[in-house]
Image: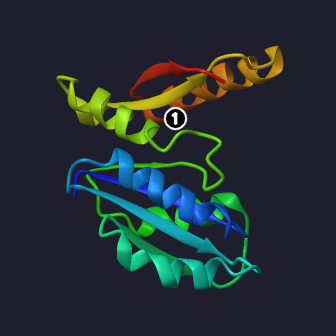
Amino acid sequence: MKLSIVIPCYNEAKNIPLILEKFKSVINRDDIEVIMVNNGSTDNSHEILDELIFQYPFARVINVAVNQGYGFGIVSGLKEAKGEFIGYTHADMQTDPSDPIKALSIIEKQSNPHNCYVKGDRKGRSLFDQFFTIGMSAFETFLFGLKALGYQRSA
């Protein structure tokens, strides 16, 4: 497996069919997995996932019994990831599902792909949000000791 994409889902019953269809339209290779983490949802997300998941061979479901926050959902999925590279995104499609596929393309073009990470940069954000993003990028670069590669996309 080349890429694992973790998607924490908390009460995302309406978005689950949409995001699975969008990933179906952008995944054009068989070495990418999408891990849908039912993150303790109290709506019918669990039932929707159980009903739909068999239609998407690239996807599988991890169930978290009690929601402990977005980060816990991410970590729960990452623990189950089988990909050489890993990433996560939002179930409510705050980010385009094609973004992790673009990130993999950027990584695969590097001479040392295991010594970098990719982070998206949204345009049209407030000054505070831009400052926070720059700070987090610096922190991540320091923490991981890796080169940050980025790309810009519209707001």
Secondary structure of the residue carrying numbered label 1: helix
Residue density around tag 1, few if under 14, some if 14–19, many if 20 or more, within 10 Å: few
Residue occupying the far left of the picture = 111
Please identify the quadrant where the C terminus is shown.
Answer: top right
Residue 120 vs residue 117, the one in the foreground = 120
Amino acid type, label 1: Leu
Residue 8 sits in which quadrant? bottom right
| Quadrant of the image containing the N terminus | bottom left
* In the displayed structure image, the side of residue 155 where residue 106 appears, left or right: left
Q: Closest to the observer: 82 or 114?
A: 82
**Residue 119 rendering spot, x and y as whole percentages:** 49, 30
Residue holding disc 1: 143
Name the spot of residue 141 as percent of width and height, x first.
49, 27
Q: Residue 51, image x and y in percent? A: 50, 83
Nearer to the camera, 32 or 135:
32
**Above or below for 22 versus 36:** above
User: Residue at (48%, 44%) from the top-left corner?
Assistant: 97
Asked where in the image residue 17 lies, by quadrant, the reply is bottom right
Q: Relative to 72, is 55 above or below?
A: below
Q: Quadrant of residue 106?
A: top left
Left or right? Give the position of 55 relative to 90. left
Q: Is residue 119 above or below residue 1?
A: above
Indicate whether 70 appears above or below 49.
above
User: Whole-percent x and y of residue 104?
Assistant: 31, 37
Q: Residue at x 55, y 48 (%)?
A: 89
Q: Which residue is drawn at 37% across and 64% down?
A: 81
Residue 34 left/right relative to 130: left
- 30 vs 75, nearest the viewer: 30
What's the colour scheme? rainbow
Q: How many labels does the image show?
A: 1
Name the residue: 80% across, 14% down.
127
